[in-house]
Image (cartoon, rainbow, N blue to C red):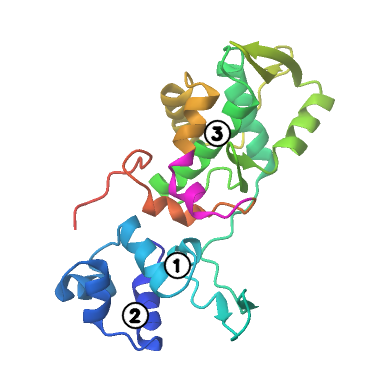
Amino acid sequence: MAKELHKKLKSLREKSHFSQGYIANKLNISRPTYIQIESGERELTISEAGTLAKIFDMSLADFIVGKESAKLVVRIKGKKEPVRINTSEIRINIPQEKANKFEQVLLYILAKIGGKPNIGQTVLYKLLYFIDFDYYEKFEEQLIGAKYMKNTHGPTPIMFAKIIDRLEKGQKVEKVKSKFYKYEQTKYLVNPDKPLDLSALSAQELAHIDWEIARLGDMTATQISALSHIDTPWVAAGDRESLEYEHVFYRPEETSIRQYEEL
């Protein structure tokens, strides 16, 4: 849950003049249970968050990250489309791109599994995404902290093109075209004559990357893309919008990697 979201929920309810009983009924829970949510003693489920977002006429993404009145919708009689007035936005977290760490993580992945037949550009995108977002869920700290955009085939690291171009020009990687079964793919092979610099990565970060490679490194592009498509950060984002790191705390069981204590 985004920090202090329960306080934002209470504020939204009071400004809308809804009773606790009314919201509880909409969520199909008891009023005492709803009071626990507002007091921060109980987490919301994704389904409940979606219902609340609809009640307050907000996007799920805005509601989850705690943006109160990020978009004010004014409906004018006779107009087919609402007029939207943008007000100030509250960002819980702004990822800081770390190009040096991005480069080292990418080279480390390629050095370990880049030669495997399934490791094309699409799989690399998703590996980087899960490495970044899983680390944030587990440790509440950023590993790379890169920005990822929602595309049809899943999260796309915005920095990838720039970093891979720099690596190619520095002759650290070579781009090759290949086929994986009947599908065309772009692969990147590490130059074995270039030393691998991992100075920006801690032992904990390297252990995390190894863990992700072990569990995801054999997936095809189709399989790992499908996994990313059920992950809350991708689900909550609009098309071509950036994915929010804070959404990892609303993940479904299939993608959540952190052991949460039962409330």
* Amino acid residing under circle 3: Lys
Q: Find residue 167 and report its image quarter.
A: top right
Task: Answer with mark 3 or mark 1, whichever residue precedes in sequence.
Answer: 1
Between 25 and 148, which is closer to the camera in this rendering? 25
Q: Is residue 117 above or below residue 231?
A: above
At label 1, counting other C-alpha atoms closer than 10 Å, the crowd grade (few under 14, some 14-19, many 20 or more) is: many
At label 3, counting other C-alpha atoms closer than 10 Å, the crowd grade (few under 14, some 14-19, many 20 or more) is: many
Q: What element does badge 2 sit on?
A: helix
Q: What element does badge 3 sit on?
A: helix
The magenta stretch spans residue 232: yes
Measured from the top left, where is residue 31 in percent x and y?
17, 76
Measured from the top left, where is residue 229 in percent x and y?
48, 40
Q: In front of the other: label 3 or label 1?
A: 1
- Which residue corresponds to mark 3? 126
Measured from the top left, where is residue 107 in percent x and y?
64, 26
Q: Is residue 96 above or below residue 49?
A: above
Q: What element does badge 1 sit on?
A: helix
- Which residue corresponds to mark 2? 10
Between 17 and 169, which is closer to the camera in this rendering? 17
- Label 2, label 3: how far apart the Cα atoms are: 36 Å
Q: Which mark is residue 63?
A: 1
* Amino acid residing under circle 1: Phe
Q: Residue at x 63, y 38 (%)?
A: 101
Q: Is residue 148 above or below residue 225?
A: below
Task: Answer with mark 1 or mark 2, whichever residue precedes in sequence.
Answer: 2
Viewport quadrant of the C terminus: bottom left
User: Which region shows up in magenta?
Assistant: 229-239
Task: Answer with mark 2 or mark 3, whichever residue precedes in sequence.
Answer: 2
Q: Residue at x 35, y 40 (%)?
A: 257
- Label 1, label 2: how far apart the Cα atoms are: 12 Å
